[in-house]
Amino acid sequence: MNSLDQKQPLLSYDGKVGELYGIFIKNLLLQIITLGIYRFWATTNTRRYIWSRMRFQGERFEYTGTGGELFKGFLLAIAIIFGAIVGAGILSAILRAITGSAALALVPIIVLYIVIAVIAAGAYFSAQRYRLSRTQWCGIRGGMTGSSWVYGAYALLYGLLCIVTLGQMVPWVSMRLAERRINASSFGSLPFHFEGRARALYGAFVGTFLGVVALFVVLGAVFLKSIMAFLPIGHAPLKAHDPAAFAAFGSIFLFYVLFIVGALLIQCFYLALVTRHVMGNTTLGTQLRFGSSITAGRLLGMMLGNLAIIVFTLGLGFPIVLHRVMRFAADTLQVSGQLDPQTLGQSDQQPPRTGEGMLNLLDHGGAF
Amino acid sequence: MPTGTRYYDGHTAAPHVATLRWSEAFLSIDGVEGELAAWPRARLIVSEPDPEGRVALACKGEPGRVLTDAFALPVQMTAPRRQRWHYLGWITIGVAALALAFVLVVRLPAAGAALVPRSAENRLGEMVESVVVGKHRVCRNDDGQRALEQLEARLAHAAGIAQPVRVVVIDSKAVNALTLPGARMIIMRGLFQQVSNPDQLAGVMAHETGHIARRDPLTALFRSAGITLISTTLGIHLGFADVSSLAGRLVGLSYSRDMERLADANGVAYLQASGLRSDGLAAFFALTEKRSGSASGAIEFLSDHPRTLDREARNQGSPVGGSALTAQQWVAVRAMCGKS
């Protein structure tokens, strides 16, 4: 980075929390009125604002997606999943009637489950394709090659690998999946490139893994009594007059919260390392190199702060959190090099017509 | 003249210095060497202005974009869209949103419950009953069962419940009784062991009868559906803790506390109306209080029932009136699960 770059960072975010609140409140009210259907337009409003407040080389980004596209994608996803379920049911009934074998009739149902799992895993890939295709900079949009089915199938197989190895393959798997997502992406005529080395992450990963296991054991020992008390009434009837049952429920809840939050905080060191590794080894064409100055301490402070804001405002502090996250991302993301507008051509990837349907259906939407 | 207008052709990222020419139906974009593009005004999309007061123009179906100053646009393109009405509109929407939330949580559940046909409610009750009974043994002892049904029939008559109430005793050591949809009451064996006389049992049964008379289980179901709907709508899913549904649950609990207070008061009234002693419920609360110690304020906030002490104080009842069960009936009831 030369001295000029440092004075004027290549990438900057200049959003205002007050303006985000205006959008947030408007979205909130309209979502209540429309029983939640406005969600898709709400997401679009927020993204349009955030994209337009991000600048690269002095030029603003533009989000060109619409709520209608997200809504149509959602309806399409419902139709596909519903069709698949009905189809598998009919096929299963036919097989049963013809062969009379219950085992054979189970095959379409098992296939259905696998297909849904592949779709769910691939949903992140197709959502990224949509977002890239709706991101414009100087009239140039992003794009993505490859198939979300292939990505979903790999993600599923890798997931099984992680389960078989009790989580020890997680760093390797996350590198391979990041490679698949990043190397399929491009901006205009320039492809993104990333090559990860899981070896660089293993030390931090093993430490984190042991930390989380230790946290589980310690919390488990502390709450053992109430967990035991809770087990016999695990499927408790509608309500229990018994205050003991209630206290047990409360401490199980506390156990859950402490474990999830604790595990998240322990992971900070590893997450920061992964982010630095992924960003540091990503390039766009030959012109741009990326990097990240994220540290475990800053990430920890960020997460604790966000958690506190969300919890103490019962979710109404969400725009503040979003603002903090964007500022943090723009602060820690480093870009070096220069994009030449004259040679940056348009993406040759056909933009998808609708977007994020499966992600919205199977994962209840993204972050914003 | 617009200043600093730039045109991006959508083929490369290179900016072209441009001048905009507006005619009746078209926007012509002129470059240094002649017209770069002509867009029909009907298909124009104008973005919100950025902090520098610049807007992006695009045309549906065309690849390029124009970046220009918002003040340079023709008036009708950036008309301050009825500013005053704008805010009034949002306020109206806000009020309507609050009203809708209020209706969903406060009014609709009871109305919705009233609309559910009895047959559907009974089927639902059957389903829930089989879940609640689960692995527990159903205690059947004809004398005890008949005594409970007679007592419940008197209470139900006082409460004006048309449908006969189904009473099921299950062999569970929990000190509890609950009401299910479709006029069903489940009593757990632990309750018989906890209470010291049949009047206390009658007090608890009268309380549950209060729930049946108001179809509270069904109303609670509708209410929790409404709260779920609202909290999912507002839902901010952080992936680890769903904060707004937690808040929704707290709201739901406080509503069910109101239901409990009403059921307490109605229960005492039913006992009096059927000519029975009505101090059993208060005595039961006093007993529970003595055995389990007072629940603290924090627990009450999280609990679906009001504090026992308050409930005792509010529902004293009166010792005037007949006893709920005869001595033989009481023995039969306590022997229902084969233990005494």
Image (cartoon, coloured by chain):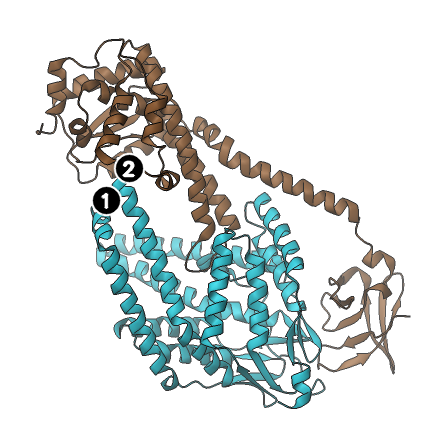
Chain colours: A cyan, B brown
Determine whether, in the image, residue B327 is placed left or right of residue A118: left
Residue sitting at x 44%, y 59%: A362
Q: Secondary structure at mark 1?
A: helix
Q: Which mark is residue A240?
A: 2
**Nearer to the camera, B308 or A26:** B308
Residue under label 1, please give it.
Answer: A233
Res B3 label: none
Residue farthest to the right, as pictured: B1
Q: Is disc 2 in contact with disc 1, using a CB cutoff of under 8 Å?
A: yes
B314 on left or right of A45: left
Instruction: Please tell me which residue lies in front, B155 or A341.
Output: B155
| Whether labels 2 and 1 share one chain | yes
What secondary structure is found at the residue carrying circle 2?
loop
Q: Nearer the viewer, residue B335 or B8?
A: B335
**Mark 2 vs mark 1, CA separation in Å:** 10 Å
Does any portion of residue A72 appear in the rendered image?
no
Q: Horizontally, is A135 left or right of A362 in the view?
A: right
The amino acid type of the residue labelled 2 equals Ala
- Crowding at dot 1, Cα within 10 Å, few <14 / some 14-19 / many 20+, comes out as some
User: Upstream in the sequence, badge 2 or badge 1?
Assistant: 1
